[in-house]
Image: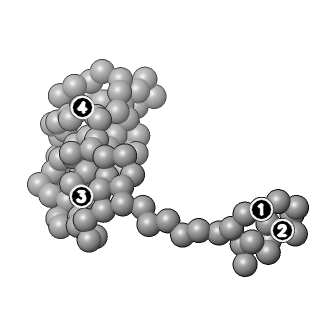
Amino acid sequence: MGALIAQKLGFSGSLSALHRLNEGAFMYENEKALNPLEYLDLDSNTYCGDMSDILLGRKLQVENFEKQEEGIYYILNDEMLSIVQLSADGVEYLLNSLSLKA
């Protein structure tokens, strides 16, 4: 079929199916779950307020973080991962409450 499409377009060609085994650092291992912490290139931070604020997606204040410098950080709460961005405008969730349980 690919050869027919290519011929209609005026050149030689074909379709092929490739089986990708890896993408950068990610290796295919029979649907094995990956630990995102092994691949994140982010600093961790500690939320000093009530952790239920993060779990419930409430508005957060920069003053409640151990590191208050602008940047993107990950926060761990038991088996939950959140990623937040601290800036002059406040705190923004980039990812909230991703379960790390396999």
Quadrant (top left/top right/bottom left/bottom right) for the N terminus: bottom right
Name the kind of residue labelled 3 in the image.
Answer: Leu
> Does residue 46 appear to the left or right of 11 in the view shown?
left
Asked if disc 1 and disc 2 are in contact, CB closer than 8 Å, the reply is yes
Q: Position of residue 80 (x, y in %)?
A: 20, 56
Callout 2 crowding tier (Cα within 10 Å): few <14, some 14–19, many ≥20: few
Can you give x and y, in whole percent of width and height, for residue 47 in the image? Answer: 19, 38
Residue under label 1, please give it: 12
Q: Earlier in the sequence, mark 2 or mark 3?
A: 2
Instruction: Report the front residue among 33 and 100.
Output: 33
Q: Quadrant of the C terminus?
A: bottom left
Please provide percent x and percent y for residue 57. Answer: 33, 53
Rendered image quadrant of residue 99 = bottom left
Q: Nearer the viewer, mark 1 or mark 3?
A: 1
Badge 4 crowding class, 10 Å Cα cut-off, few under 14, some 14 to 19, many 20 or more, is few
Vertical placement of 62 versus 10: above or below?
above
Q: Is residue 23 above or below residue 46?
A: below
Given the image, on which type of amino acid does mark 2 rest?
Answer: Gln
Q: Is residue 42 above or below residue 26?
A: above
Secondary structure state at the residue bearing disc 4: strand
Spatial CA distance of label 4 from label 3 is 19 Å
Residue underneath mark 3 = 34
Residue occupying the far front of the picture: 12
Q: Amino acid at mark 4?
A: Asp
The residue that appears at 84% across and 68% down in the rendered structure is 7
